[in-house]
């Protein structure tokens, strides 16, 4: 088996398409991976920051995702690099690191999540990415480096001010705005169309464009706002979560049934 590895989200990004992800908070079983693949998504955002999902559950879903052809990516709690590398060793194809404000913080993250010569990630053998086969380390590490998405979340005005410097850090692939936290920090909770949020997205899109990186969006479900930011240049997109999709579809069905009488 050759040490080749595909990341469906990265493949979309590299061709200028949208990489559509779904946030997973309630799902705890491995069948969520092929279900979301069948629904048309490219990557899973396994949220280990804002719920009780544990690392073992996330890794089991990640291994299932590898087989389904949908990229497993985890958001870990801020600065928990040990958790990030364990998820990657367990089958992950990407990490979203929240609350990154400076290029120095981004550089530390990139160095920890990339194998040499790009970084200093520790090497482990027998990875699920290659069916647990024993393959040459140089080849497998190069393949994993190429396939792994390293995403940093910008969630404060300070982070937006530093967007250009963060985007210039080698090994960082995407700058994703955490719109909820940014709006809270600006004192405008929920005002995702406010001119200050629009300006933040423009700054991040410009910074990413200058460095060949990808702008990302999270925290917004309104489709017209999503369209606006996508037209601006955002490509790594999280349009909803397992909970929001389930509750929305269930609510629509219940309302339709009630209307029959």
Image (cartoon, rainbow, N blue to C red):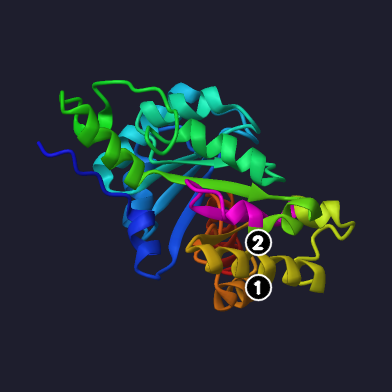
Image coordinates of residue 19 in percent, x first then y, are 43, 61
Q: Which residue is mark 2?
A: 220
Q: Foreground: 142 or 204?
A: 142
Residue 153 falls within the magenta-colored stretch: no
Q: Hey, which residue is sitting farthest left in the picture?
A: 1
Q: Looking at the image, which residue is at 41% across and 31% down?
A: 88
Q: Horizontally, is 67 left or right of 191 in the view?
A: left
Residue 170 in view in this figure:
yes
Quarter holding residue 39: bottom left
Q: Secondary structure at mark 1?
A: helix
Residue 151 vertical placement versus 83 (above, below) = below
Q: Quadrant of the C terminus?
A: bottom right
State whether residue 130 is above or below residue 226: above
Which tag, 2 or 1, sits closer to the chain's start? Answer: 2
Q: Specify start and end residues of the magenta stretch as a single range.
A: 165-180
Residue bearing the label numbered 1: 225
Crowding around mark 1 (Cα neighbors within 10 Å: few <14, some 14 to 19, many 20+) is some
In which quadrant will I find the N terminus? top left
Q: Is residue 54 left or right of residue 44?
A: right
Of residue 74 and residue 16, the one placed in the foreground of this image is: 16
Q: Residue furthest right?
A: 187
Q: SS at mark 2?
A: loop
Alpha carbon distance from label 2 to label 1: 8 Å
Q: Looking at the image, is 194 positioned above or below residue 108?
A: below
Q: Position of residue 255 (x, y in %)?
A: 61, 63
Residue 111 percent across, percent down from the top left: 50, 35
Mark 1 and mark 2 in contact (Cβ < 8 Å)? yes
Q: Does the segment drawn in magenta span residue 175?
A: yes
Among the 4 quarters of the image, the one containing residue 200:
bottom right
Residue at horizontal 60 percent and vertical 27 percent from the top: 80
Q: Which mark is residue 244?
A: none
Q: Can residue 98 be seen by looking at this rendering?
A: no
């Amino acid at each position: 088996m050759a040490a080749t590895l595909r990341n469906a989200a990265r493949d979309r990004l590299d061709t200028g398409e949208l990489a559509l992800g779904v946030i997973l908070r309630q799902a705890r079983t491995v069948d969520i991976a092929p279900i979301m693949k069948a629904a048309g998504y490219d990557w899973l955002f396994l949220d280990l920051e804002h719920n009780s999902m544990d690392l073992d559950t996330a890794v089991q879903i990640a291994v299932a995702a590898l087989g389904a052809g949908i990229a497993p990516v985890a958001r870990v709690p801020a600065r928990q690099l040990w958790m990030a590398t364990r998820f990657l060793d367990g089958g992950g194809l990407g990490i979203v690191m929240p609350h990154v404000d400076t290029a120095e913080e981004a550089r530390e993250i990139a160095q920890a999540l990339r194998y040499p010569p790009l970084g200093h990630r520790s090497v482990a053998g027998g990875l699920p990415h290659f069916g647990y086969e024993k393959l040459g380390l140089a080849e497998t590490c190069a393949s994993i480096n190429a396939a792994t998405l390293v995403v940093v979340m910008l969630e404060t005005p300070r982070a937006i001010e530093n967007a250009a410097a963060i985007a210039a850090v080698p090994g960082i692939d995407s700058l994703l705005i955490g719109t909820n936290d940014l709006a809270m920090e600006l004192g405008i909770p929920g005002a995702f169309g406010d001119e200050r949020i629009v300006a933040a997205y423009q700054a991040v899109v410009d910074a990413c464009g200058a460095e060949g990186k990808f702008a990302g969006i999270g925290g917004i479900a309104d489709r017209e706002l999503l369209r606006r930011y996508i037209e601006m240049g955002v490509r790594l997109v999280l349009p909803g979560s397992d909970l929001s999709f389930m509750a929305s579809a269930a609510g629509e069905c219940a309302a339709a049934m009630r209307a029959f009488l």
